[in-house]
Amino acid sequence: MQRAVVLGGSYAGLLAARVLSDYAEEVVIVEPDGLDGEATGPGAPHRHQLHALLAMGHAQLERWFPGITREMTAGGALVGGGRAVRFYVDGRPRPPLDDVEMLSATRPFIERSVRRRTRDLSNVRFLAGRGRGLLVRGDRVCGVRYAPAGHEHEHEHETTVAADLVVDAMGRSSRLSRWLDQEGWPVPPVERMRIDLGYATATFHRGGELPGTVIAHSTPGPDSGYQPAHCEPGALAAVENSRWTVVLAGYAGHRPTRDPREFIARMRRCVAPLREVAEHCALQGDVSTFAFRESRRRLFRATSRFPGGLVAAGDSMASVNPVYGQGLTLAALQAGALAGYLRSGAAPHAPAWDYFRRADVFTNAGWKLSTTADLAQPHVTGPYPRGYPLIRWVGDKITQASVRDPEINRAYLDVVHMRRHPRTLTRAHVLLRTARVLLDR
């Protein structure tokens, strides 16, 4: 193809551009903040909260940008595996896994590294501007309208750029549905689950405490009814510039606030690594909060018609509960789906049904994992999947066994890290070993 246009230059857009650089003569990224700035538009208001790059996300990032892990660790990021990555359920540590590696850095740091590598691609260029609409000819999208930076609210300054393929990577606040409706196309239905989550992030000075710890993550589980009665849910990550980033989360009336004294008091009710940081490390800056009202995904394959030359990626396709850390990894897996779609020889001008089919394999898995877990909260009222009581009961038993048994824990964390599909937890050998572990207790 001659030209592909990516709307949005955050993580999902950059990965899509990297994939497209192998198939298009030119790739144009339309981003309000231009070439060098961080993407700070309404699509990513939570950018400065703690983010996780799961093991599969880390592997995919290295796949598309070989050597980027080495570059980032030279700049202060950390990579941890084994006992350096500590997961807790109901305050109890899971058995460590030596072959699970996680990259630890702030999201702005990761995005700057990915943006720098993307910018170095000879056939990729950035346009500083904001997308304003689609150019449609017949049954396909043939380009986009955008307003150059500084003129986003002035229609007379709109201009256009032609494209053989357009990628919507505008994030959770994507305007694609409105644009499709304006052009007379069916709007993809949206599935929603209201979860009423709030979380807060703070940064602490990192010294010699917790030697060898890169990431610690704690969640309530079945023994506490998934409630923070005995142990606050939270996580910490060792990040660049000798800092700890700490996040605390809560639902409904238990959401954390910006009060630093309350934040540290809640840390003291967390697992040992977070208590250690609360006791011995100095808070740097303010506590930042974010509210996440609902998970949502756009069901592109449920539309009766869809224009050719158009795909979506990242949060514009699905935005799920961030406490499970799936967002960056889902974006990377969707980039892989885009590569598989283009490698198959698909015509970019045709409706991208096969791309959405490929991407849905990962999106549906992430959605199932997060929403099934969210339904354990008493204030979350559905929608419930078919057979939910049995799904919940089996999931509780596997979770309980995973804290005690390394083999069950490996199967469980392979799903959490998106290295395996959730259905692998229903295989006979996993269920039989779960039963044996719990009976031997």
Image (spheres, rainbow, N blue to C red):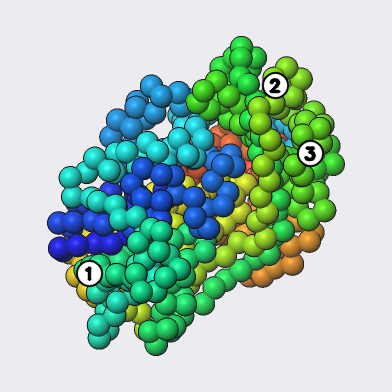
Amino acid type at mark 3: Asp
Residue 362 falls left or right of residue 326: left
Q: Is residue 388 in sight in this rendering?
A: no
The residue drawn where x is 68% and y is 46% is: 289
Residue 437 sits above or below residue 432 on the image: above
Whole-percent x, y for residue 394 in the image: 67, 53
Residue 137 sits above or below residue 328 on the image: below
The residue drawn where x is 47% and y is 59% is: 171
Element assignment for label 1: strand
Whole-percent x, y for residue 175 in the image: 47, 70
- For marks 3 and 2, the one nearer the N-term is 3
Amino acid type at mark 1: Ala
Element assignment for label 3: loop
Residue under numbered circle 2: 282
Q: Is residue 349 in sight in this rendering?
A: yes
Q: Nearer the viewer, residue 123 or 269?
A: 123
Residue under numbered circle 1: 162
